[in-house]
Image (cartoon, coloured by chain):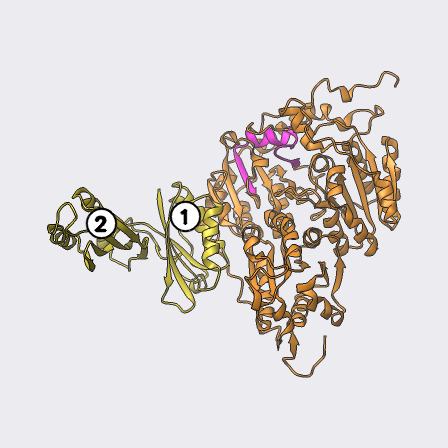
Chain colours: A yellow, B orange
Amino acid sequence: MLHTFVALVQDRPGVLTRVASLFRRLNINIVSLTVGESERPDTSRMTIVCDAHENAAHRIRASLYKLETTISVDEVNRTEAVVRELCLIKVAAGPNQPHGLHSRSQIFELAQVFRARVVDLAPESIMLEMTGSASKIEGLLQVLGESGYSILEVSRTGRMAMRRGHHTSRVLQALGTRPTLNPSVFAEDPDALPSDQTLPNIFDE
Amino acid sequence: MADSNNANPTLTGSEILLATLAGEGITTVFGYPGGAILPVYDSLRKFPTIHHVLVRHEQSAAHMADGYARATGRVGVCMATSGPGATNLVTGLATAMMDSIPIVAITGQVSSKVLGTDAFQEIDITGITLPITKHNFLVTRAEQIATAVREAFQIARSGRPGPVLVDITKDAQQATAAFDFDAARPRPYRPHPMLRAESSSIQEAVTLIQQAKRPVILAGHGVVESGAETQVLALAEAHQIPIASTLLGLDAVPANHPLSLGLMGMHGESWVNHAIQQADLLLAFGMRFDDRVTGNLSKYSPNSKKIHVEIDPSEINKNVWVDVALIGDLKEVLSLLTPLLSAGNQPRGADGSEWLKQIRASKGNASVRDIINLPDNGHLYAAHVIHDIWHEAAAAGRLDQTIIVTDVGQHQMWEAQYFKHQAPRSLITSGGLGTMGFALPAAIGAKTACPEKDVWVIVGDGGFQMTAAELSTIVQEKLAINIAVINNGFLGMVRQWQEAIYDKNYSASPILSPDFVLLAAAHGIAGATVRKRADVIPHATLARTSGKPFLINFLVEKEDGVYPMIAPGSALHEMLRRPQHDPLLELPEDL
């Protein structure tokens, strides 16, 4: 199954290697990994999506935290977090294509339905930009394919995830989120935690 | 070190390095010089408190730092130059990583101006050692040296210890910077956020322990690393829980304690493994359920609840699924757990002693078949040699002052079975990585750290030849180390597996050796060859009391096996026993 981890790591040379090497050592394939600056100075935020056994999440998170360059690690699932991905798609469209010159306007319509934007127009191709959940991007790609368009290039950033803010229990229920006692405890800087605070038993999960 | 009234003296990078080591309390460095580390070697004369031990191969330098750390619990330091010097450290670092040993390795690196250009003796050692160090640093500026080295020490010894490498470019060693030891203090140790045994989990553990009828404590290396030997023993005694040990946990509890069962796992005694298989509660203390102690996981102790006390959260549920995980330092967790157990609940009564009786009864059959109980039939067995070395030390009252350093293979397992360790840190052996050639250099580290103790190297004829060059180091350092070569003319454990699994196809396992006594003599080390059991104890005494290094070449039975043995894929109770009609055990007709 897919696991999504959000890690705050030091912004230093070699940190990405340490994270990537960890997954290699565990023989786990990384589905996507995005890194960028975070709200903290000298700190990057990584979103790592990997395909691993259901029981592997705890060990991956613990192993990630064992890296000296890791500040915090959080595992998020879809309902607890907002997950987005950016995708660029280049589609063949022009007079020589099956739909001829109509193809452009049809692609414009499709793009509108999926809330994608046209960012480049060339005589034989159109480039679309789209942000959304992975399933939405896959939906657009599927429709384009089934409509007979040939997709020339796809570039996806991979998923970025951010845990949702503190909602009321009703909102969480509506979102389908299991209420947890202290969901953000692993995301916080451990130094900031009061020493008497007990942690949720992660082995009950 | 150049004295200065100035609060923050300006020093060269190499001086900063050595001053930082001295500030961390380091008095011994094991190393080998070379181009990219020469500035440091040049500065050594200014630091008379740091003794440099010149090794014969950098791998040995890492093993020596390792042996030093295992003998004392303090951080060991080794040093090498760039390129081949650094790559030679790799096996030693991996050995320390697998056994959680705190060492700091310093390597020279080519100048930062030529980094990445394949300069002479340049190698990406921080890249190479990434998976076999707890952490590593590349330092390119003199200003960063003190901070990096102090952080390295903190990382090496905190939490689950491990090796840390600091790679320092030559220009950083040569440049100057202000040195302030205190200002370079690292941020306080950052415990894992999961590193707090939760009160509800502790309560569950208490309930499990109180309900258990057939509990067993599994004592691992963490017991010694945490310094929790007394706490574990107190818990065991209060609740009459027998203790089985992993190889690295063997010296955690005195072997002659009535609750101590001995070695578990692949070559553990049958009653130990049967006890684990029949247990209804396993208390795993600072151990990681290695495949060498569990056998076939799907059949491992099937009816027991399991409590795992472990400092490294990534070890939880890795191999064996546990019912209660108490993450934290063993000593701290036990200090929370033990008071709850004694409060208002009597220790297990009749049932408890019933379980101990049951385990003791199962010893009977096994000890009859034990090679150690057979009369002297004219053959010399490795088991007898090790037993007699133990007996000699015990008779002399030196057991608490004896460190045994073993290599890897059959003799290592016989040592674990027949040497009855009394004191923590009295056994030094490569467990996780199983590094042949470890013993001799690790013993040099141990003897350097503990010159007042008797240090015995127990090593096979194969492993000894891997690092025998360090005999020179022993002589140069004037170390009175006793070396027992268990010489059977084979790579014994390989031969045993070939006998058991590969139809006695002894492919590449017979090994020719030089006359080890002559080899020792060439180094100026006295020695003797022993062929008869009656000669073992006199020679052990001679070696121990000579005050100089001494090598004994024990010519033992060539095709003896370590039993019991669990074949790969078998469950813990499915042991291969010593064959009933072992030709080795039959008395010669003329006796």
Residue for point 70% across, 31% down: B509
In the rendered view, does B292 fall on the left or right side of A95? right
Q: Chain of mark 2?
A: A
Identify the image quadrant of the C terminus of chain A: top left
Mark 2 crowdedness (10 Å alpha carbons): few <14, some 14-19, many ≥20: some
Q: Amino acid at mark 1?
A: Ile
Q: Where residue B45 sits: x, y (%)?
A: 76, 70
Residue for point 73% across, 69% down: B42
Q: Can you say whether A95 is above or below B558 in the image?
A: below
Q: Where residue A175 sits: x, y (%)?
A: 23, 51
In the rendered view, does B390 fall on the left or right side of B356? right
Residue for point 87% across, 42% down: B518
Q: Where residue B200 sits: x, y (%)?
A: 44, 48
Q: Amino acid at mark 2?
A: Lys
Residue for point 56% across, 57% down: B126
* Residue B264 covered by magenta stretch: yes
First of labels 2, 1 by sequence position: 2
- How far separated are the C-alphas under marks 2 and 1? 32 Å
Q: Which mark is residue A202?
A: 1
Reading the image, the residue beneath label 2 is A136
Q: Chain of mark 1?
A: A
Q: Can you say whether B504 is above or below B29 in the image?
A: above
* Residue B294 covered by magenta stretch: no
Q: Where residue A99 sits: x, y (%)?
A: 13, 47
| The furthest residue to the top | B589
Mark 1 crowdedness (10 Å alpha carbons): few <14, some 14-19, many ≥20: few
Q: Which residues are magenta?
A: B261-284
Q: Is residue A80 visible?
A: no
